Image (cartoon, rainbow, N blue to C red):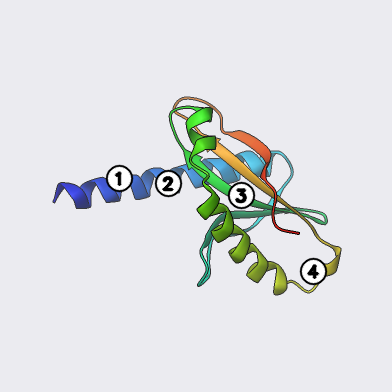
Amino acid sequence: MTDTLARRKAYRRGHRGEWLAALALMLKGYRIVARRYRTKLGEIDLIARRGDLVLIVEVKARPTLVAAMQAVACSSERRIEGAADLWLSRQPDYGQLSVRFDMVAVMPRRWPVHVENVFYGRN
């Protein structure tokens, strides 16, 4: 029973973190085009766009910025890249888009921190 409650609490915390991250990006002028975009290769927390720039955003709710940055592992980078490739291949203006892999760290009692280029995708 406690495992179920802990999982539910983590799910709500993640949802709240993604909502705050989306709000922070929208205030910076980005349009959120997808939330929790799921593919067979993995999930992207947020996809945001401003003009021809597309942000593939990983949201991490952690106590510190360092902990959030350490939580983006190589395995999750590959998962995010694969899902991003699938999303991008379905866009009609694919050839004109610039893609950036960012992270938004959501920490207690602080405004979300947007970290640009948290990792670089394959060439």
The residue mark sitting in front, 4 or 2, is 4
Figure check: 47 above or below 63? below
Q: Which residue is mark 4?
A: 94
The residue mark sitting in front, 3 or 1, is 3
Q: Is 90 left or right of 69, judged from the image as shown?
A: right
Mark pair 4, 1: CA separation: 38 Å
- x then y, percent, for residue 23: 59, 42
Q: Residues within 10 Å of mark 3 (few under 14, many from 20)?
A: many
If you read the primary sequence from the N terminus, does the residue marked by circle 4 or circle 2 appear first? 2
Residue name at image x 79 percent, y 69 percent: 94
- x then y, percent, for residue 56: 65, 53
Task: Assess whether mark 1 and mark 4 are in contact (beta carbons under 8 angstroms).
Answer: no
Instruction: Please tell me which residue lies in front, 29 or 122.
Output: 122
Circle 1 — which element?
Answer: helix
Q: Amino acid at mark 4?
A: Tyr
If you read the primary sequence from the N terminus, does the residue marked by circle 2 or circle 3 appear first? 2
Q: Which residue is mark 3?
A: 57
Instruction: Please tell me which residue lies in front, 63 or 92.
Output: 63
Q: Which residue is mark 1?
A: 9
